[in-house]
């Protein structure tokens, strides 16, 4: 397929097209697709452990069919058409390395994964939408969280040369395949690195490891540029794209600074404007927080374009506060547009948490996994949803965390202690146990029944979050004028 989108590059601190006219990128992340996530897709735990469990219980053939059909229904050309109608001009596609390489056969690449990604790029480009390829889950895990497909909280990537070599070789392969494709705006080299998490626990005060981050980014740029000299490199800061003070960008002249910018006002609970998490939030607070973000300051100092690759509202909190969450994010996007910041909201489609669209609550998929979703909420298994009300389980975790602190020789951050105890206990251990109840839903279904159930994920059977999408469309229309 011929791609007619003009090439993008970086010039004088801006993203520009072939005529050197500024282009403002605004759109959405396609989370939960080629990198599945528990709160997005409805299952507990990590994707890789779910896949193993599915193979054990369903057999390899039926398990492969399940995941193939899940992805086939989750994203299609109708989704791309809808997004263009909303005003989207860029889609960030998070991908898991496992779609392109097996751990048992390192440095050998899977055509099936590239074929799926090719198809998505063709869908989006045919509707005038650029794609940013985001390596969201890397070999050995670049951070300790579920979104890097991490089931154990050890970020081994930073201490094992083997994983780093495979990461660089995969980027060489990706860049070789898309070097001549102008519909690809660029490469988000690594999602949310956390360089000091090799042992799976944070120290009381996190100290960024910019030497490790700068080394891997420099090596990635060198290996990509051997086969692709044109595409933009989007680089994220340490500690989940929040720390930038000593990040190096001198090794390439086509770099965009990428930060992530979730806010308490976007999550709640609490009225907006109003006091949220002990602090008064309004549009001025939002602006102050944006300007104080290390990514904002870093981009300004280095004269780099800034892209907020992730942000968004929590839409599954108290129903009466949904308008508060939307007002907060509306103020946030207005600031992005005012400061010329490129943006992609997290995320396009999910189970009614943050999505622009969601499966209908009465759909077959949602009805079949209803008890799974209830169990996940009751047990607080989805670590991402910290804004949800406390449960009996989280209250027990609080007590256990306090008991540990009674015996420690020196004080530690109580909030962090409880946070990591909760994550290890619930999302790592507890969610792994509960994966059985999700797998059992599909264990006795025929392939035809599985396909019919997963068809609930297709755009034609989803419901649109009209209030959210209308607000986004207004901002994208304004963004297009920048």
Image (cartoon, helix red, strand yellow):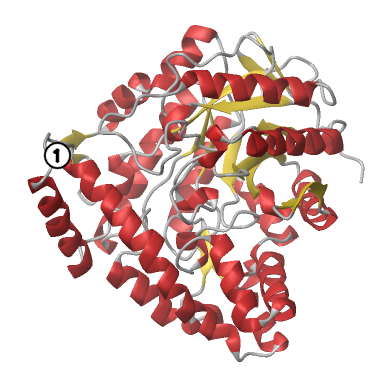
Q: Residue at x 71, y 85 (%)?
A: 447
* Residue 18 percent across, percent down from the top left: 80, 19
Task: Tell me, yes or no, if residue 454 can be seen here.
Answer: no
Question: Label 1: how many residues lie within 10 Å, few (<14), some (14-19) or many (20+)?
Answer: few
> Picture quarter containing residue 200?
top left
Q: Residue at x 57, y 73 (%)?
A: 53
Q: Which residue is disc 1 drawn over?
A: 278
* Residue 310 percent across, percent down from the top left: 49, 39
Location of the C terminus (image quadrant): top right
Placement of 368 over or under 378, stated as above or below: below
Q: Residue at x 22, y 45 (%)?
A: 417
> Picture quarter containing residue 152?
bottom left
Residue ranking furthest to the right: 1
For numbered disc 1, what is the local secondary structure? loop
Q: How many marks?
A: 1
Q: Is residue 414 left or right of residue 194?
A: left
């Amino acid at each position: 397929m011929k791609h007619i989108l003009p090439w993008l590059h970086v010039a004088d601190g801006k993203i520009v097209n072939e005529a050197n006219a500024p282009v403002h990128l605004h759109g959405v992340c396609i989370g939960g697709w080629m990198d599945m996530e528990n709160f997005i897709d409805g299952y507990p735990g990590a994707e890789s452990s779910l896949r193993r469990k599915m193979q054990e219980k369903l057999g390899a053939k039926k398990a492969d069919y399940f995941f193939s059909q899940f992805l086939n229904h989750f994203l299609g050309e109708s989704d791309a058409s809808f997004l263009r109608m909303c005003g989207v001009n860029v889609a960030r596609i998070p991908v898991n390395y496992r779609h392109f390489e097996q751990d048992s056969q390192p440095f050998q690449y899977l055509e099936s994964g590239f074929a799926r990604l090719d198809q998505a790029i063709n869908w989006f480009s045919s509707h005038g939408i650029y794609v940013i390829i985001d390596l969201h889950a890397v070999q050995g895990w670049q951070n300790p969280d579920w979104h890097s497909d991490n089931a154990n909280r050890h970020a081994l990537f930073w201490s094992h040369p083997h994983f780093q070599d495979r990461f660089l070789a995969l980027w060489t392969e990706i860049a070789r395949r898309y070097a001549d494709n102008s519909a690809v705006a660029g490469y988000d080299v690594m999602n949310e690195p956390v360089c000091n998490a090799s042992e799976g626990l944070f120290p009381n005060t996190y100290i960024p490891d910019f030497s490790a981050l700068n080394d891997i980014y420099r090596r990635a740029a060198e290996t990509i540029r051997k086969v692709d000299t044109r595409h933009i490199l989007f680089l994220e800061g340490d500690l989940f794209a929040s720390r930038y003070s000593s990040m190096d960008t001198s090794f390439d002249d086509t770099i965009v600074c990428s930060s992530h910018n979730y806010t308490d006002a976007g999550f709640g609970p609490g009225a907006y404007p109003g006091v949220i998490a002990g602090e008064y939030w309004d549009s001025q607070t939002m602006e102050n927080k944006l300007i104080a973000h290390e990514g904002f300051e870093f981009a300004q100092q280095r004269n780099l374009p800034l892209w907020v690759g992730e942000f968004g509202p929590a839409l599954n909190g108290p129903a009466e506060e949904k308008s508060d969450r939307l007002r907060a994010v509306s103020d946030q996007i207005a600031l992005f547009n005012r400061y010329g910041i490129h943006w992609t909201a997290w995320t396009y489609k999910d189970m009614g948490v943050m999505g622009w669209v969601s499966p209908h609550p009465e759909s077959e998929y949602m009805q079949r996994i209803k008890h799974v979703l209830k169990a996940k909420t009751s047990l607080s298994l989805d670590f991402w949803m910290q804004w949800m009300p406390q449960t009996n389980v989280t209250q027990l975790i609080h007590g256990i965390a306090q008991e540990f602190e009674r015996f420690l020789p020196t004080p530690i951050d109580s909030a962090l202690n409880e946070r990591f105890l909760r994550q290890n206990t619930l999302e790592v251990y507890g969610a792994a146990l509960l994966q059985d109840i999700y797998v059992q839903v599909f264990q006795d279904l025929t392939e035809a029944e599985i396909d019919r159930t997963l068809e609930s994920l297709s755009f034609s059977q989803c419901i649109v979050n009209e209030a959210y999408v209308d607000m986004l469309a207004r901002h994208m229309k304004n963004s297009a004028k920048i």
